[in-house]
């Protein structure tokens, strides 16, 4: 990618950011549709987990996301991994529990879970973009 002209590289980066923005907007749209189409706003409980999900990463891991993939003995990083995993499981479990309790229907649960997977895809895309040395970083 170093042999490309500067204007082409800038356009390529802008396109990747636009794709990332479309993924996040699609996830938000699916989240709202799961509530609005079925006139039941209980699925919005997963938004709490989406807000809680990045908090351990921001507080304990800082801007060094590569340390999350290593086998370090730091208890703060282990706590970060545990809390992030618990929030992720909660994001999947809330729609399933609501469906099991009969509060929401199959369609709302499917939209909620698809919203979660779109958000996961956007997070993985962002992490893929930030591992390259292009100027993107966690903060």
Image (cartoon, rainbow, N blue to C red):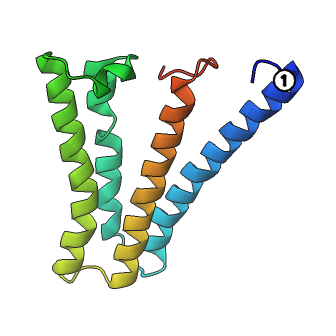
In-image side of 20 versus 49 (left or right) = right
Q: Nearer the viewer, residue 22 or 105?
A: 22
Q: Nearer the viewer, residue 25 or 138?
A: 138
- Is residue 66 visible in the rendered structure shown here? yes
Quarter-of-image position of residue 7: top right
Q: Secondary structure at mark 1?
A: loop
Residue 40 lies, in percent from the top left, at 36, 76
Give the residue at x 23% y 63%: 94
Q: Residue furthest front?
A: 3
Give the residue at x 53% y 26%: 130
Determine which residue is flagged by label 1: 4
In-image side of 76 versus 40 (left or right) = left
In-image side of 114 versus 61 (left or right) = right
Residue 70 lies, in percent from the top left, at 27, 23
Is 84 placed above or below 89 here?
above
- Is residue 40 visible in the rendered structure shown here? no
């Amino acid at each position: 990618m170093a042999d490309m002209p500067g204007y082409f590289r800038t356009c390529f980066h802008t396109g990747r950011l636009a794709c990332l923005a479309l993924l996040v907007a699609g996830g938000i749209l699916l989240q709202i549709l799961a509530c609005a189409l079925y006139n039941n706003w209980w699925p919005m409980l997963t938004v709490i987990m989406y807000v809680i999900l990045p908090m351990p990463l921001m507080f304990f891991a800082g801007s060094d996301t590569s340390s999350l993939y290593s086998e370090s003995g730091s208890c703060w990083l282990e706590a970060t991994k545990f809390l992030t995993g618990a929030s992720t499981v909660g994001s999947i479990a809330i729609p399933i529990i609501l469906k099991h309790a009969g509060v929401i229907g199959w369609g709302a649960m499917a939209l909620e879970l698809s919203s979660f997977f779109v958000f996961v895809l956007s997070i993985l895309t962002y992490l893929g973009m930030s591992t390259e040395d292009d100027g993107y970083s966690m903060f």
